[in-house]
Amino acid sequence: MKTLYHRVAGIDVHRLKHVGTILIEQADGGTEQHTREFGGFKRDLRALVAWLRRYQVELVVMESTGIYWKSLYAHIERAGIESWVVNAHHIKHVPGRKTDMADAHWLAELGRFGLVRGSFIPPQDLRELRLITRYRKKLSGTLAGEKNRLHKVLDDAGIKLGAVVSDINGVSAQAMLAGLLAGEEPSALIDLAKGRLRGKREELLLALDGELSARHLLVLQSLQGHIGYLEGQLGEIDSYLIAAMQPYRWAWELLQTIPGIDAIAAAMILVEIGEDMSRFGSADRLASWAALCPGNHESAGKRKSGKTRKGNSIVRYLLCEAANAARRTKSVFASKYQSLVIRRGHKKAIVALAHKLIRTIYVILARREPYRDSGIDYHAAAVSKNAPRWIRALKQFGYWPTKTPVTA
C-alpha cells in the first residue's frame, strides 16, 4: 500500500499516562521507530508536543477515549500539528497483542496508510460551548425529575391538583400550591384560578382537599425551593447561550425557520454539529454520524436488521425532541408522522422524523437559505395576511374603484 504520511505519531491515551510511537519512513522504504511515555499533567503534555515537533511529525492519531483526549488534542492543535481522533471501534488490534506500546504503534501504522478517518472535532469555541449545552441538558433533566417528585408528594398527601390543571407549574397552580404551603383552606384557594380554570371550581375544591402532614410540607417546601433555583439557573444559561450565538447568528436564525426548532434547540444543535457542512460532505454522512439513519446489515443477499447504530446521543436527543414538536405543526413533518405512526408506532416514527430533520438541517446550512415547506403556499399565505392592509391603502389614496361599471 502507498503511504500517505511519512512522519506519523500514534498516541495511546490514558488519564495520567500517554504512550507515543513515532514512525518515520526512510529512503529505502523502511521505518524508524521512536517510543516514549509521558504523564497526564500540563508540563507532560507540553513535553509531548515538543517531542513531536523535534521529529517534525505530520500527523498524530489517537483514540477517542472518554474525555482524556481533549486536553492533549488542544495542546497539539495549538502547536499547529494535524491531529485525528479516531473511533476506537474502527481500530481493533490483533488479539493477543494488547499493550500500550502495541496500541500506539498500530495507530501510527493505520495513520501512515490512511486506513482510518478522523472524527469530527468542532472548533475550540464550540467545544467549550458544549460544556454549557450539556450541563443545561443535565439541569433540565434534574428539573423534570424534581417536578415529577412534586407530583408524587402531592398525590401521596391526597391532593390531586395535577389531575385537574393542565400544568402544575402554571400561574394558577403555583399560587394555589403556595397557599397550601402557607396553611390556607382549599375554599379560599379556588378564587386564585384564572382563565378556563374558573369553570372547574368544584373539581378544584375536591382536588385541593387532602391531608398535608408536617413531613409533606417539609418535602414540598424543599422541592419548591429547588425547582425555583433550577429554573433560575436555566434562565441564566439560556441568556448566556443566546449571547454566545452572535458569531454564528446566520446559521442560528436559519435553524429556527425549521418547524419544531426554537431558539434554544437551534443553539444546542449548532454547538454539536457546527456551521460548516463541508466537514460532513453530504446529508447522508451527517445523518450517519448522528446515528439517525437505518443501519446496514446484509449477508448472503439478505437484508437483516436495520437498527440504528450508536452515535452522538446529544444530537439524537435534541432532534427527537424537535421531531415531537414538529409533528404538531402544519408542515410536511406532520403528514410524514401521520403516515408512519400507524404502521411503525410512535417511537420509530419520531426517529424517522428526526432523520428527515437532520437532512433538512444539512441542506439549509449548506445552501444558506431559510426553510420553505413544500406543503405550504407561501404566496397565498402572504396575500391572505396582507390583503386587508393593501385594500385599506388603496382606498386611502384613491386607487380603489368607487363606481360600478355600466353593463351593456
Image (cartoon, grey):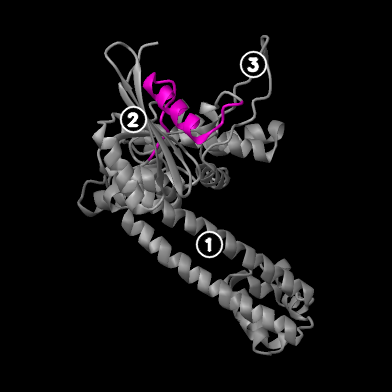
Q: Residue at x 77, y 81 (%)?
A: 209
Q: Taking 140 as reference, is 121 above or below it?
A: above
Q: Amino acid at mark 3?
A: Glu
Q: Measured from the top left, where is residue 402 in percent x and y?
A: 27, 47
Secondary structure category for the residue under label 1: helix
Secondary structure category for the residue under label 2: helix
Q: Residue at x 55, y 34 (%)?
A: 292
Callouts 2 and 1 close, C-beta under 8 Å: no
Left or right relative to 246: residue 375: right
Residue under numbered circle 3: 298
Q: Amino acid at mark 1?
A: Leu
Q: Measured from the top left, where is residue 390 in percent x and y?
A: 29, 48
For the residues labelled 2 and 3, the Cα–Cα distance comes to: 29 Å
- Residues shaded magenta: 96-121
Q: Residue at x 59, y 32 (%)?
A: 309
Q: Residues within 10 Å of mark 1 (few under 14, many from 20)?
A: some
Callouts 3 and 1 close, C-beta under 8 Å: no
Q: Amino acid at mark 2?
A: Ser
In front: 219, or 340? Answer: 219
Between discs 2 and 3, the one toward the N terminus: 2
- Is 113 covered by the magenta stretch? yes
Q: Which quadrant would the C terminus be assigned to in this image?
A: top left
Q: Measured from the top left, where is residue 49 in percent x and y?
A: 30, 41
Secondary structure category for the residue under label 3: strand
Between discs 2 and 1, the one toward the N terminus: 1
- Is 68 covered by the magenta stretch? no
Between discs 3 and 1, the one toward the N terminus: 1
Q: Which quadrant would the N terminus be assigned to in this image?
A: top left
Mark number displayed over residue 139: 1
Q: Taking 49 as reference, is 16 above or below it?
A: below
Q: Measured from the top left, where is residue 233 in percent x and y?
A: 46, 68
Residue under numbered circle 2: 278
